[in-house]
Image: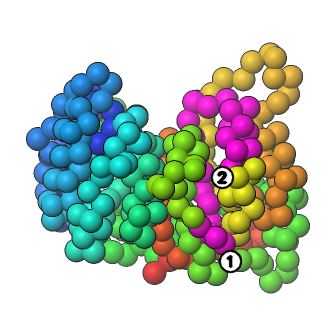
Amino acid sequence: MAHIYIYSPSGAVRDKAAFRRGVKRLQARGHEVEIDPDALSSHQRFAGDDDTRLAAIARAAASGAQVALISRGGYGLTRLLPRLPYAELQQAIERGTQFVGLSDFTALQLALLAQTSSQTWAGPALLADFGVAEEPDEIMQDCFDDLLVGQGEGTGWRLPLSDLRAEPALNAEEGWGVEQAQLWGGNLSVLVSMLGTPYFPQIEGGILFLEDVAEHPYRIERMLTQLLHAGVLGRQKAVLLGQFNRYQLVPHDKGFKLQSVVDWLRSQLQVPVLTGLPFGHVPTKVLLPVGARLDLMVSGREAILFWD
């Protein structure tokens, strides 16, 4: 049984039924669920005003929980970055609290990495993953359980054939890989919004993973272009693309689609671009240690990330 602290550092929780379902499901799995007193607070589109959400983050850090899990993403953390309790968060992580989330949570993860080198986890949120009307995804739950018991050592996925055709280096008989590279990334929109600030990690020779939701492929390309021109992409050893979904193509696109963006990106980079990473705003998602050093191995169509 794990102690899980639920708090809301970003958007307001509108779906109270999903919140209750998520809490009950975690409790049904034998966990002690502690709910922050302002988890359901609301101020404009936020889960309380800035001071309220900063206090919630500080309480999560002081909770002593094994996992501090966000209720949802949305927007709100980037405006808090200068005031985050970095020392308290770092100390909580050193004591064993694992901070887990995605989407807007990318802002806190990258800022914490840049300011303290602390590791967090890109993973589920309460509402979108545990609070769904249907049963939560089994792979997501298994990965979350692995984190709780300290058994997770890596994750893998099957690459599309188009990756092998487009990336000749992956077809080496002995396979292809990267050793002890720092994993970082998250939501593309949030990550790009932090570029040029003190809260953007300066990672050389890392493995960058990216995902996004409700962004048309041309907007995805525009953000990738900014990272490319800023020199961020070229300094990595590999770029992993997760799930990009919930967008609508229009007749004006004339065949321009997400694969067009991937093809263009590959034409601009000397480092491999791997797709299909099971992470993003989708039910089936793995947990990824943001800031950890790990190995990336590709053998045929099998890609595997190994960490301690």
Identify whether 285 is placed above or below 76.
Answer: below
Q: Position of residue 12 (x, y in %)?
A: 28, 30
Q: Nearer the viewer, residue 260 or 45?
A: 45
Q: Is residue 265 left or right of residue 129?
A: right
Q: Nearer the viewer, residue 1 or 34?
A: 34
Q: Is residue 279 left or right of residue 39?
A: right
- Residue 241 - label: 2
Q: Position of residue 245 (x, y in %)?
A: 60, 35
Q: Is residue 78 left or right of residue 189?
A: left
* Amino acid bearing label 2: Leu
- Mark 1 neighbour class, 10 Å CA radius: few under 14, some 14 to 19, many 20 or more: some
Q: Nearer the viewer, residue 112 or 179?
A: 112
Magenta run includes residue 216: yes
- Mark 2 neighbour class, 10 Å CA radius: few under 14, some 14 to 19, many 20 or more: many
**Residue located 30% across and 30% down the image:** 46
Q: How is the image coloured?
A: rainbow
Quarter occupied by the N terminus: bottom left
Quarter occupied by the C terminus: bottom left
Q: Position of residue 83 (x, y in %)?
A: 30, 49
User: Under tag 2, what secondary structure?
Assistant: strand
Identify whether 150 is placed above or below 144.
Answer: below
The magenta segment is 203-227
Image quarter of residue 188: top right
**Residue located 33% across and 33% down the image:** 11
* Amino acid bearing label 1: Val
Identify whether 236 is placed above or below 293.
Answer: above
Residue 183 shows in this picture: yes
Mark 1 lies on residue = 178
